[in-house]
Amino acid sequence: MSFLDKLSKTVGKSITWAFSGALFGAFFSGVLNFLLIENTSPWLASILATMLAGLVISAYFGSMLVALGGTLAGILTAISYQILFATYHQPLILLGIALIAGLVAGSFFTKREIRDSQPLAQTGAGFMAGLISGPLLYVIVSSTPVGYHGWEVAAVAVSLVGLCYVFLIKHRLSVLGSTGALKIGGPLVSGLIAMAVAAVFWIIGESYMTIPELGQISQYQQVMDAAPLGLLGGALGGAFGGAMLEILGIRMEEHIA
């Protein structure tokens, strides 16, 4: 393979992973800042944010069709809830409705679609990658100038979760590909994605709420402010990871489906 061919493949994979990394970074930064606003301990916030972001983004990355079904269910649920219950904001009820809608949507996928994408195996690998990366991220942030509110933390998180995901997807547990896992994989993953999407819509709505008497901006505005930085950091971390995969000769497409 010539140098130009190798360079073009490296650039192409970097761009592909940059898009995935950007999505991860934005979601991760939003979840992390939301948890910090709610006075969650930094170490626990790091673990929860990497786990949730790893779970959600791995579903999009490896099982796009199922993830899109859950996304549509989550969007419709969030919009309907905000219209019907404009003055009754109960996020847990919203998440419960979104879960049910996602489970119903996921039940319509065919066995072939589930078998080809193996959504439970994908999200399981992403979840475990986030669980492993969370403590490492906390140690890095605590011992270096990297803060929780900059683009750097998203870049580090993407790199750590991506590295763990590559390993876990190549050595995933056989039970995640069993017949039982395939049966529940579609509805379960679709339901989880619907909950995540509905939660994002709720946070966006809360971030733009104001107190008319005082004119104060909601504390959740910090979550919205963190998303662009997470987008940037995730894209940079994803591009670096994609380039390294190509340079090392690791072909993720052989393990995604």
Image: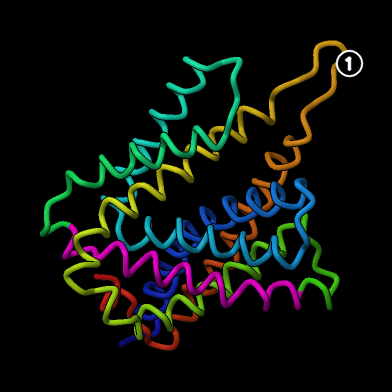
Quadrant location, the N terminus: bottom left
Residue extent of the magenta highlight: 114-140
- Towards the viewer: 137 or 144: 137
Q: Extreme right residue here?
A: 214
Secondary structure beneath dot 1 equals: loop
Q: Eyeballing the image, is 170 above or below 117?
A: below
Residue 192 coordinates in the image, percent (x, y): 41, 50
Quadrant position of residue 5: bottom left
Which residue sits at x=45%, y=43%? 195
Which residue sits at x=71%, y=22%? 209
Residue 97 coordinates in the image, percent (x, y): 41, 34
- Residue 119 located within the stretch drawn in magenta: yes
Which residue sits at x=68%, y=64%? 46
Which residue sits at x=78%, y=35%? 219
Q: Is residue 163 left or right of residue 77?
A: right
**Amino acid under disc 1:** Leu
The residue beneath circle 1 is: 214
Residue 244 coordinates in the image, percent (x, y): 49, 81
Residue 99 coordinates in the image, percent (x, y): 39, 42
- Residue 152 located within the stretch drawn in magenta: no
Q: Is residue 66 left or right of residue 74?
A: left
Main SS, magenta region, reads: helix
